[in-house]
Amino acid sequence: MKNSIAGPMQPVPYRIQGFERETHDTFTLELKADDKVSQLLFSPGQFNMLYVFGAGEIPISISSDPAYPESIKHTTRVVGKVTKAMHALKPGHTIGVRGPFGSSWPLELGRGKDVVVIAGGIGLAPLRPALFDLLAHRQRYHRIILLYGTRTPRDILFNRDFKRWRSYSDLNVYITVDRAIGAWQGNVGVVIKLIPRAPFDPSNAIALICGPEVMMRFSIEALRQRGIGSENIFVSMERNMKCGLGLCGHCQYGPYFICKDGPVFRYDRIESIFNKVEV
Ligand SMILES: Cc1cc2nc3c(=O)[nH]c(=O)nc-3n(C[C@H](O)[C@H](O)[C@H](O)COP(=O)(O)OP(=O)(O)OC[C@H]3O[C@@H](n4cnc5c(N)ncnc54)[C@H](O)[C@@H]3O)c2cc1C
Ligand code: FES
């Protein structure tokens, strides 16, 4: 964390600048350092440990544009104690931030290639900074394809971004929902179904995937069937965390710590442990 004198175990106070409701159960907090000058430089795919006073500390990916480190955003789905307490926070309240931690999406490996971004549900949050970065350097890449799946149309995150992204002729956006409700006229079915006909060249592409593990597993299978090598597939993994620094062992994943060696892994490095439930 630039300009911070605190150690990596010491949360730094950040002020909530903005609260945006994304869907019925998901919200985005915009945070600025309390001293108003510190910047949190990060790479797409990294996460922070967010400490909600009186409730606890949890890992949440950074969902904003890395080009604007002076205020950072986190997009969170309410699932339990800490996320519920975080949802109750208001602009002006303070939250503790440690980070950024972990590995990032290897966008440099996509230069001159097709980049296939596959997201399921809240998995779009850690991929959003990558999309901002890919689009900011559009000329470096060949095709950019975004495949996004959610449960229903009302679960679609970042509607404002999608409006803009869909207007770009050089970004291929495909959304699908498990269950169509309301006036939805788009694709219905799991995101994996979009992979066989997505417009990319498997011999010259990298894929970035984030979502529930079962969705990532079937996405990898579909990509492998199209001919993408395991070394060109990258996934973001999740486990419960405590320290975020590779010290406590809470997030051990085979020979790795997800907080330090991940969360983004090249698939061939974890292929042998990926399908095991508890490693
Ligand atoms: C590197 C990393 C990045 C993450 N980024 C985001 C993000 O950008 N947005 C977001 O909404 N969430 C993200 N998560 C998940 C988030 O950390 C958990 O949802 C959160 O810790 C739950 O805390 P809680 O106290 O609200 O829920 P708890 O009361 O701890 O748990 C509620 C329920 O959620 C389940 N759960 C808890 N933690 C996880 C987890 N890590 N993965 C799957 N299920 C879990 C529990 O088993 C339980 O069923 C990330 C996790 C990791 C490891
Ligand atoms: S959270 Fe402590 S080792 Fe990863």
Image (tube, grey):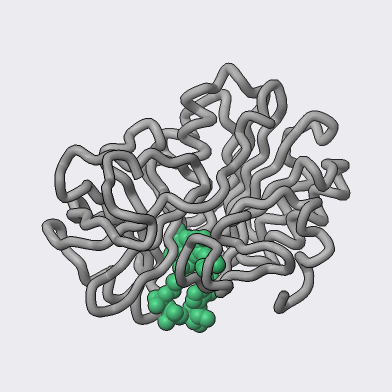
Whole-percent x, y for residue 124 in the image: 51, 52
Classify the position of the N terminus by image quarter.
Answer: top left
The correct choice, above or below, for 232 with respect to 186 in the image is above
User: In which image quadrant can residue 226 be found?
Assistant: top right
Whole-percent x, y for residue 260 in the image: 57, 56
Whole-percent x, y for residue 30 in the image: 26, 50
Q: Is residue 152 visible?
A: no
Residue that protrudes farthest toward the top in the picture? 139
The correct choice, above or below, for 272 with respect to 230 in the image is below
Q: Is residue 20 visible?
A: yes
User: In which image quadrant can residue 120 be found?
Assistant: bottom right
Looking at the image, residue 224 sits to the left or right of residue 205; the answer is right
Whole-percent x, y for residue 61 in the image: 45, 55
Looking at the image, residue 146 sits to the left or right of residue 5; the answer is right
x 73%, y 40%: residue: 198
Q: Looking at this view, is 197 or 26 the one in front?
A: 26
Q: Looking at this view, is 180 or 260 the one in front?
A: 260
x 49%, y 49%: residue: 46
Q: Looking at this view, is 116 or 105 the one in front?
A: 105
